[in-house]
Amino acid sequence: MGIQQKWAQYEHQTIFNYAILPQEIQNKGKTITFQPKQFIVSRGDFLRYVYFIKNGSAMGTRNYADGNEYNYFLIDQQNGNIGLLELFAREPEYIASILCTTEVTAIRLDAELIYDYVIKNPEMLRRCITLIAKDLYQRSANDGRFYYLDGINRVRHYFVDYYHEHLKDPKKKVTVYAEYRDIAASVGVSIRTVGRSIRQLKEKGEIQSSGKKVIIDADNYALLLSSLNLS
């Protein structure tokens, strides 16, 4: 049996969210409602709980060791767990601040309870391994990808990746919640370059905007992808 056939045996065990928890674990959780723009956890808080998002979405700010570079990721009920990475890295503090973009209903469970449950359950271990490994793989694949790109193509690349990562329904648009300074830090250019690139991309019809937020639909994505110069 080849490796792909081996993977196929467990391909249904790749999600780790509230819905897959057994009822006896769910019953030990506490339901908490957070309002838009309210933090669920803040970077540096002690890891006491793991949160599972039941409804709504939130935005995370992940900081690197030097404190200067960070990017955003979006979580919802499909991939929405907070604290799992820290729990299995055996790190006592949350690495990211998680800010609600909508009203969020989350289930809060003791970190100790989740750790004990997963460690003793092979299926849950497989789910956690896949979840964490996919995140690491994606980030490793991104190392050095901007080395040969100019400013506007770095920003294009950022929007292409953001759209691909956060699209849930092909018929819907994706709103980019990152601000200019955060995009600049993520792709390694100045805030001024990000602003200039965004203006140019809007003029070319590759992105849209509403207020200060960039919006990308399927047509915008196709234009961004076709215009991306990787040379």
Image (cartoon, grey):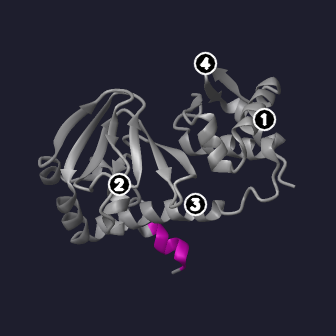
Counting residues from the start of the chain, the first of labels 1 and 4 encountered is 4
Dot 1 crowding, Cα within 10 Å, few <14, some 14–19, many 20+: some
Q: Residue at x 35, y 54 (%)?
A: 94
Dot 3 crowding, Cα within 10 Å, few <14, some 14–19, many 20+: few
Residue 67 in the image, given as x and y percentages of width and height? 52, 54
Q: Residue at x 52, y 64 (%)?
A: 136
Secondary structure under tag 2 reads: loop
Dot 4 crowding, Cα within 10 Å, few <14, some 14–19, many 20+: few
Counting residues from the start of the chain, the first of labels 4 and 2 encountered is 2
Residue beneath label 1, please? 223
Q: Residue at x 31, y 40 (%)?
A: 40
Membership of 67 in magenta stretch = no
- Using the image, tell me which numbered label, if any, was put on residue 211: 4
Q: Tell me whether the residue at label 2 lies in contact with that at label 1, contact meaning CB atoms closer than 8 angstroms.
A: no
Counting residues from the start of the chain, the first of labels 3 and 4 encountered is 3
Counting residues from the start of the chain, the first of labels 2 and 3 encountered is 2
Residue beneath label 2, please? 94
Residue 21 in the image, given as x and y percentages of width and height? 24, 53
Residue furthest right as drawn? 231
Secondary structure under tag 1 reads: helix
Which amino acid type is shown beneath numbered disc 3? Arg
Quarter of the image for the C terminus: give it: bottom right
Q: Say whether residue 189 is left or right of residue 77.
A: right
Which amino acid type is shown beneath numbered disc 2? Tyr
- Using the image, tell me which numbered label, if any, was put on residue 139: 3
Quote the CA–CA distance across marks 2 and 1: 37 Å
Which stretch did the figure color magenta?
Answer: 2-8
Above or below 230: residue 40: above
Which amino acid type is shown beneath numbered disc 4? Gly
Kindly indicate the quadrant of the structure image that contains residue 215: top right
Quote the CA–CA distance across marks 3 and 4: 30 Å
